[in-house]
Image: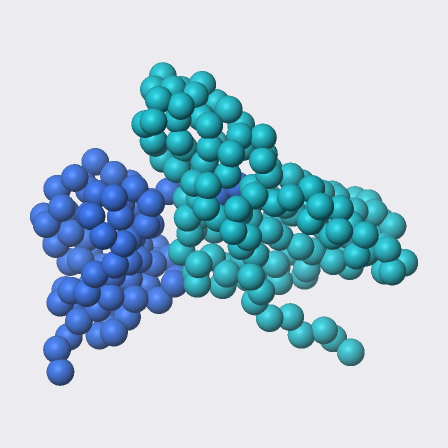
Amino acid sequence: MSDRIRLKAFGMLAEKIGTDSLEIENPGSSEALKRQLLQQFPELQSLTFRMAVDRKLIQAETAISTGQEIALLPPFSGG
Amino acid sequence: MEKVRSPKNIFVQGPISSEKIAQSIANHATKTDIGGHSIFLGQIRADEKPEGKVIAIAYSCYEEMALEKAFEIREEIFAKYPLTCMHIYHSLGEIKVGEICLFVFTSSKHRKAAMQACDELVERIKAELPIWGKEILDSTATQWKVNT
C-alpha cells in the first residue's frame, strides 16, 4: 500500500497551483510538505498561507499520516 | 432538558434576501422570553481599487472545516452569553454590490447579551472561518479580498 495524502488548495493558492485538489506521496511532516510545495510551485514563495490537517489548523510542525487530508489556506476573507 | 446542538449548515448559495431576514425575525414571535434581538448584515461595498471598481465578490470556502469551526464558535458563544437563539448565514458564489452576504442574528432576554454576542460572532466569523472572497472589478480584472 502506498503512502499517499490528499491535498486541497483554496482561494489564490488553488489558482497558483492550477487545481484545488491533488493526491501526492506523503512527505511525512508539514514542514517537509511545505518545502516540497515551494520547490514544485515557486509562485507560492511570495504568498502567505497556513495548513490544516484533517480540518484543524496547525500551529507548529506536525507529522502527517497516510490518508490524512491536508489543506492549504490563504488568509481568510469571509464576511 | 439540555438541548443537544449539532453542526448545521451556515452557507447559502447566492445573496441573502430581505425576505429571508424578515421571515427569520417573524419566526421568533412565538419565543416570548426574548426581549432583544441583535442583527448584523454584511453588504458588498463598491470599493474603488487602482485596477477598477468592485462590482461583486465571489465567495468560496472549505466547507467541512468551516462548518466544524462555526459549530465550535457557536458553542463557545452560547457558553459565554445567556442567549436564547443564534443564527449565522454566509453567502457562497457571486454576490453583487449592495447585496447581503452575511447575516448574524442573536436573541436574548435582555439586550446587552444579544448585542455583545453578535459583535463577537461577526469578528470571529471573519477571522476564523475558512472563507475567501474574490473581488470582481468593472475592468474585468479580479483580485483576492483582504480582511481588515
Closer to the camera, B13 or A53?
Answer: B13
Question: Could you tell me residue B16's position as x and y percent?
Answer: 61, 45
Question: Could you tell me residue B65's position as x and y percent?
Answer: 43, 60
Residue B15 higher or lower than B108, as above or below: above
Quarter of the view holding residue B143 = top left
Q: Can residue B116 be seen by looking at this rendering? A: no
In the displayed orientation, state which residue is furthest to the left.
A39
Question: Could you tell me residue A38's position as x and y percent?
Answer: 14, 47
| Residue at x-position 53% and y-position 30% | B97
Q: Judge from the rendering whether residue A33 lies leftward or rightward of residue A73; answer left or right.
A: left
In the displayed orientation, state which residue is furthest to the right.
B32
Closer to the camera, B81 or B15?
Answer: B15
Q: Judge from the rendering whether residue A51 lies leftward or rightward of residue B79; answer left or right.
A: left
Question: Could you tell me residue B27's position as x and y percent?
Answer: 79, 57
Q: Can residue B36 be seen by looking at this rendering? A: yes
Task: Give the drawing colour for chain A.
Answer: blue
Quadrant in the picture for the N terminus of chain B = bottom right
Q: Judge from the rendering whether residue A28 lies leftward or rightward of residue B62; answer left or right.
A: left
| Residue at x-position 44% and y-position 26% | B54
Which chain can be seen in cyan? B
Residue A19 higher or lower than B15, as above or below: below
Quarter of the view holding residue B15 = top right
In the displayed orientation, state which residue is furthest to the bottom.
A1
Residue B53 higher or lower than B16, as above or below: above
| Residue at x-position 44% and y-position 59% | B63
